Amino acid sequence: MTTLSLFELAKFCRDFVLEKKALAPVILDLRGISTVSDFFVICGAQSEPQLKAIAQGLEKTLKERYGKQPYAIEGFPKSHWVIVDYGGVMVHIFHEEKRRYYALEELWGDAPRL
């Protein structure tokens, strides 16, 4: 199996969520800014079923194609926020309203967007 660099993994996640019709996906480069993760991929969903489909589809696809499993999955569709944690890449999938409320892009405003 092909291995992915963290940057490649972040790009793959962004491209995957776009295919699932996620809203406004963005990659934040946190290298040198945070010890939490190197990259955040942040996107929106319009419904709980879409949020669930994005999270489950991403997990399944990365496992099948690259043998990559998340360290953790936090949250659930009813909470309107799911985080799929691949260590150096954390994918935040928000319901639109929660994304605006938590405003991670503003919180990490000094992080370059890729």
Image (cartoon, rainbow, N blue to C red):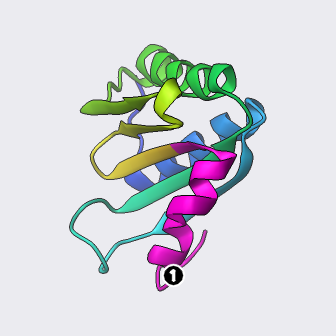
The image shows residue 3 at horizontal and vertical percentages of 38, 35
Q: Is residue 36 magenta?
A: no
Q: Which residue is mark 1?
A: 109
Name the amino acid type tagged 1: Gly
Q: Is residue 48 above or below residue 27?
A: above
Q: Is residue 39 above or below residue 75?
A: below
The residue lying at 75 percent from left, 32 percent from top is 19
Specify the quadrant of the image occupied by residue 30: bottom left
The residue lying at 29 percent from left, 80 percent from top is 32
**Image side of residue 20 versus residue 11, left or right:** right
**Image side of residue 98 versus residue 38, left or right:** right
The image shows residue 47 at horizontal and vertical percentages of 70, 29
Q: State which quarter of the image contains the C terminus.
A: bottom right
Mark 1: secondary structure: loop
**Image side of residue 33 versus residue 113, left or right:** left
Q: State which quarter of the image contains the N terminus.
A: top left
Write down the region rendered in magenta.
93-114
Q: Which of these two is toward me, 67 or 40? A: 40
The image shows residue 58 at horizontal and vertical percentages of 53, 26
**Image side of residue 108 versus residue 25, left or right:** left
The image shows residue 78 at horizontal and vertical percentages of 51, 26
The residue lying at 27 percent from left, 31 percent from top is 72
